Amino acid sequence: DVKVTQSSRYLVKRTGEKVFLECVQDMDHENMFWYRQDPGLGLRLIYFSYDVKMKEKGDIPEGYSVSREKKERFSLILESASTNQTSMYLCASGDSGTLKPSYEQYFGPGTRLTVT
Amino acid sequence: QKEVEQNSGPLSVPEGAIASLNCTYSDRGSQSFFWYRQYSGKSPELIMFIYSNGDKEDGRFTAQLNKASQYVSLLIRDSQPSDSATYLCAVTYNFNKFYFGSGTKLNVKP
C-alpha cells in the first residue's frame, strides 16, 4: 500500500514563528503536493513539485515556501506564521500524470495547524 | 482560475436509495475527473475516476461525464449509512495538477 506520512497530526504555533511541515512518501512518486483545506473552500493547492528541487506555485502560494531535496520528502515552510494560516494541511503524492489520465493522488493524514 | 463547483449540501437520502452528486467545471480543457470521499477528520480517498464521455460503473458507484455540458456526477446505489461523508470532485488540466471542488456532504439515514 502507498503510504504518505506527515510529521505531525496537530501543531500549535505562535504568530511570527517559522513552521516546518514535512511529508514523506514511500512509493517513488514523481509528484508531490501541498494543499490546505478550510470549511467551505475545499482543497486549495499551495505548491507542488514534479521532481527533486523542482517546484511550481499553486493557487495560494503567498506566505509559504517549499523544499524538495529528496524524491520522497516534500516540506512546506511558513516563514512567519500568521493567524490566517490556521488550517488543515494535506500532503499528497502521485505518479507523473503525463500520458496516464487515470493516475490518482494519495493523501497523507493531514496536519491541523493552529496559529495563535 | 479553474472553477469546480459543487453543492455543499447536506444531501440527505434514506438507506437503500440512490444518492446523486453533481459537479460542474469551467474549463473545457479539463482532461480527467475524479471523485474522492472524505470522512470527517480523515484525508480524502479516491472512489473512482473518469475521462471519457458516458458512464463508468464500479460496484455501487457510477460516474457520469458530459464534456459538452461540463458536468460530472456520481451516483451511489443502495446507499448505506457508511457512505455518509463529504464527496469531493476534482479535475485535472495537465494530468499533474488537480483542482478540487469544495465538496458535497452526504447523509444516509438508517
Image (cartoon, rainbow, N blue to C red):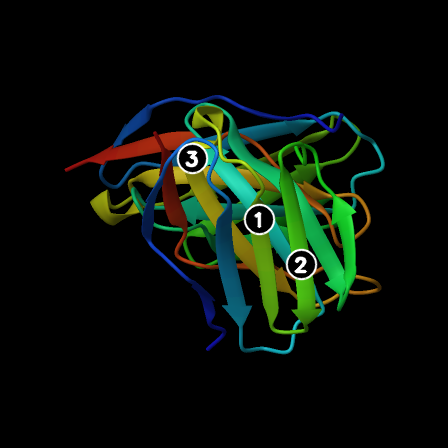
Residue B62 vs residue A96, the one in the foreground: A96
Which residue lies under the disc numbered 2? A67
Instruction: Answer with the quarter of the image where residue A108 lies.
Output: bottom left
Mark 2 to mark 1: distance in Å?
8 Å
Q: Are tags 3 and 1 found on a single chain?
A: yes
Residue B41 appears at what percent x and percent y?
A: 30, 45
Q: Are tags 2 and 1 found on a single chain?
A: yes
In the image: residue A108, left or right of residue A69: left
Name the front one of labels 3 and 1: 1
Which residue lies under the disc numbered 1? A77
State if disc 1 and disc 2 touch (CB < 8 Å).
Answer: yes
Instruction: Answer with the quarter of the image where residue B54 lies.
Output: top right
Residue A105 seen in this snapshot: no
Name the front one of labels 3 and 2: 2
* Location of residue B91 with respect to A41 vertically, above or below: below
Residue B92 appears at what percent x and percent y?
A: 73, 45
Closer to the N terminus: mark 2 or mark 1?
2
* 10 Å crowding of disc 3: few (<14), some (14-19), many (20+): some
Q: Chain of mark 3?
A: A
Residue B110 vs residue B98, the one in the foreground: B98
Instruction: Answer with the quarter of the image where residue B105 lies.
Output: top left
**Residue type indicated by callout 1:** Ile
Residue at 41%, 62% in the rendered image: A7
Mark 3 to mark 1: distance in Å?
14 Å
Residue A33 appears at what percent x and percent y?
A: 62, 53
- Where disc 3 sits, the SS reads strand
Residue A8 vs residue B104, the one in the foreground: A8
**Residue type indicated by callout 3:** Ser
Residue B24 appears at what percent x and percent y?
A: 64, 27
State if disc 2 and disc 3 touch (CB < 8 Å).
Answer: no
Closer to the N terminus: mark 3 or mark 1?
1
